[in-house]
Image: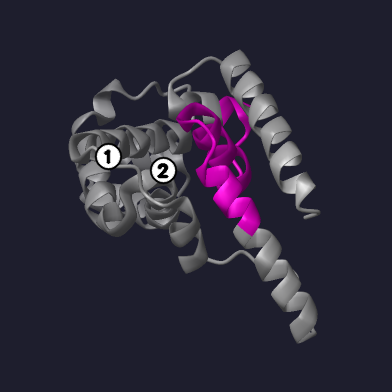
Amino acid sequence: MDDDEAVTRALAGDLGAYEVLVTRYSAIAHRTASLLGAGDEAEDVVQDAFVRAFRHLRSFRRDASFRPWFLRIVANVTHDLTRSRGRRSDLAVRLEREPYTPDGPDDPESAAVGADGRSRLYEAVRRLPDGEREAVVCRYFLQLSEAETAEVLGVRLGTVKSRTFRALRRLREEVGREHL
């Protein structure tokens, strides 16, 4: 069942169809909440986001994609949480819980050098201004398109492009110095 059919059936009262969406998007919702600052409360954020999405399913534009619409809800719930707590979570710690190693090196020396480089990169991303950090997280850690990133963050496409450009320039300057 595709997203459109699941939404249609959920709107008609089929809770099993909504469960399909919950199953399909739970992992990326959890990762989004974690990367945007929910930390240990990511599970609560995801549950709240699914409840809000279900309550507002009638306002979902049927010509749009469900994934970015839902991830925007996750981002909003995460922002509400982090603002209310008055804190900024540590991105490096969150990312180390979910290491990314697509084709990890075979020898221990390469693994150590790679881990050190990733650690420096994550620290540099953590220090970016909020808007730039969010754009980088969505584009590169969550692998969303520019359009999806704009929708998730609630900004214009041009804003995503400029924030990403500035963030990558900062990262090249900072991490490039340390020969990553």
Residue situated in front as seen by the camera: 121 or 137: 121
Find the magenta span and give its range. Answer: 120-148
Callout 2 crowding tier (Cα within 10 Å): few <14, some 14–19, many ≥20: many
SS at badge 1: helix
Q: Amino acid at mark 1?
A: Thr
The image position of residue 42, as x and y in percent, is 30, 54
From this view, report whether residue 142 is shown above or below residue 97: above
- Residue 132 is inside the magenta segment: yes
Sequence order check: which comes first, mark 2 or mark 1? Answer: 2
Mark 2 residue type: Leu
Report, in whole angstroms, how far the alpha carbon at label 2 lies from the one at label 1.
9 Å
Q: Residue at x 25, y 33 (%)?
A: 83
In-image side of 142 versus 153 (left or right):
right
> Can residue 159 be seen from the camera position used here?
yes
Task: Pinpoint residue 95: horizontal percent, then vertical percent.
Answer: 50, 59
Q: Residue 139: give x, y in percent of width and height.
A: 61, 38
Our reading of the magenta stretch's main secondary structure is: helix
Q: How is the image coloured?
A: one colour
Checking the image for residue 82, the label placed there is: 1
The quadrant where residue 116 appears: bottom right
Which is nearer the eye, 176 or 148? 176
Would you say 115 lies left or right of 128 here? Answer: right
Circles 2 and 1 in contact, beta carbons < 8 Å = yes
Specify few, some or many for label 1: CA neighbours under 10 Å numbering under 14, 14-19, or 20 or more.
Answer: some
Residue 12 visible in the current orientation: no
Residue at 43% across, 21% down: 154
Where disc 2 sits, the SS reads: helix
The residue lying toward the viewer, choosing from 1 and 128, is 128
Residue at mark 2: 36
Q: Please identify the quadrant where the C terminus is shown.
A: bottom right
